Amino acid sequence: MKQRKGEIPDFLGDLDELWTVDDMASYLRKPVSWVYDNHKRYFHAARAGQQLLFAPAEIKAWIRGQMWPK
């Protein structure tokens, strides 16, 4: 089914709860600087002013894709 403009893609999950950079760093057990340095490479982020926000479902899906064996 084609996604309509303004519609949220299914892979983003529920956007009622978004993670901040601090939430991401804590979840991934990485420094906050790593999240800032690598977010464009690995994750989609929404910007609210200067704050980056992430969809937890996308982050968890990315981690599942990194697990072995495939």
Image (spheres, rainbow, N blue to C red):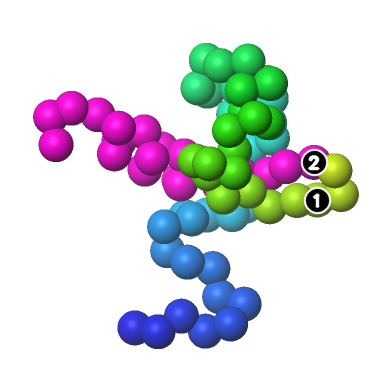
Q: Is disc 2 surrounded by few (<14), some (14 to 19) or many (20+) residues within 10 Å?
A: few
- What is the distance, in whole Å, between disc 2 and disc 1 at their CAs? 5 Å
Residue that appears at 75% across and 51% down: 47
x and y percentages locating residue 15 in the rendered image: 59, 54
Question: What is the quadrant of the C terminus in the image?
Answer: top left
Q: Hey, what amino acid is under mark 2?
A: Gln
Quadrant for residue 18, please give it.
Answer: top right
Q: Is residue 20 above or below residue 13?
A: above
Residue that appears at 34% across and 83% down: 1
Q: Is residue 2 above or below residue 63?
A: below
Q: Is residue 18 in view from this perspective?
A: no
Q: Which residue is mark 1?
A: 48
**Circles 2, 1 touching at the beta carbon (< 8 Å):** yes
Residue that appears at 80% across and 51% down: 48
Q: Is residue 5 above or below residue 20?
A: below
Q: Which residue is mark 2?
A: 51
Q: Which residues are magenta?
A: 51-70
Lateral position of residue 34 relative to residue 64, left or right? right
Residue that appears at 45% across and 45% down: 57
Q: Is disc 1 surrounded by few (<14), some (14 to 19) or many (20+) residues within 10 Å?
A: few
Q: Hey, what amino acid is under mark 1?
A: Ala
